[in-house]
Amino acid sequence: MTRSPGAASAASGARSHRLRIVGGQWKRTPIAVPDVAGLRPTPDRVRETLFNWLGQTLDGRRCLDLFAGTGALGFEAASRGAAQVVLVERDRRAAAAIGSTIERLRAPGVRLVAGDAFDVLHRLAHAGERFDVVFVDPPFEQALHARALEALPAVLAPDAVVYVESGDAFSAPAGWRIEREGRAGQVRYHLLSRQADAPRGIDA
């Protein structure tokens, strides 16, 4: 749920409506899109495709939404039965909107962590937290995808998958394999897994 300052028109469109959860127990429930410059919600049809890839239910899975924005990817996961969802967001207004949605949904398995994604990854790794599904949708122009994928192995459970959204052509770094991929307009999206013989990687 990236903030992309260069995409002013997309941001303006995002602020003109409320996003809706597309599946699960909270299907059609609106999510507030705060007035944050460059906030670019993941399109509904992309989220629908992603959760078709993951399976319509995520019962028992632990999920991490690393650059949460509106929190739509994390809330979709929780709506579909995820046991735990951690939403990471550093913008104060976006984090406040996420917090309000958590309260409104009465979602005890959803936790907001306000702060820098990489600082939070470091803390999660040292706390021994592990995740089955991770959503990586950072601001496109900041080229954070590679850095995130380098740090993520420290918090991945066995057989974990990672969703990556990008604006440009994307190639899987060493140690990763693209399982599924698609494109919707300017958005490219991918589902990745770790290769069996890949090293664990560096700590975040």
Image: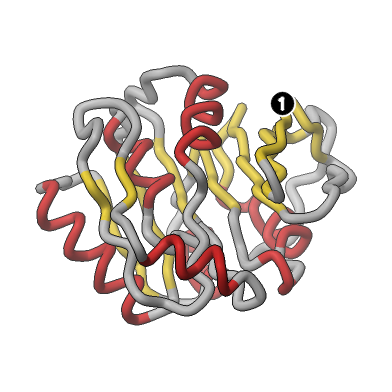
Q: Nearer the viewer, residue 2 or 185?
A: 185
Q: Nearer the viewer, residue 114 or 50?
A: 50
Q: Residue 156's spot in the image, x, y percent?
A: 58, 43
Residue at horizontal 25 percent and vertical 73 percent from the top: 96
Quick check: can you spot residue 121? no
Q: Quadrant of residue 61?
A: top left
Quick check: can you spot residue 39? yes
Instruction: Please give left or right for residue 181 compared with residue 31 in the image.
Output: right
Q: Is residue 15 above or below residue 26?
A: below
Q: Is residue 91 above or below residue 68?
A: below
Q: Residue 203's spot in the image, x, y percent?
A: 67, 63
Instruction: State which quarter of the image contains the C terminus.
Output: bottom right
Q: Residues within 10 Å of mark 1 (few under 14, many from 20)?
A: few
Residue at horizontal 73 percent and vertical 31 percent from the top: 181
Q: Quadrant of residue 179?
A: top right
Residue at horizontal 28 percent and vertical 63 percent from the top: 98
Helix, strand or loop status at disc 1: strand
Q: Quickly name the residue at label 1.
A: 180
Q: How many marks?
A: 1
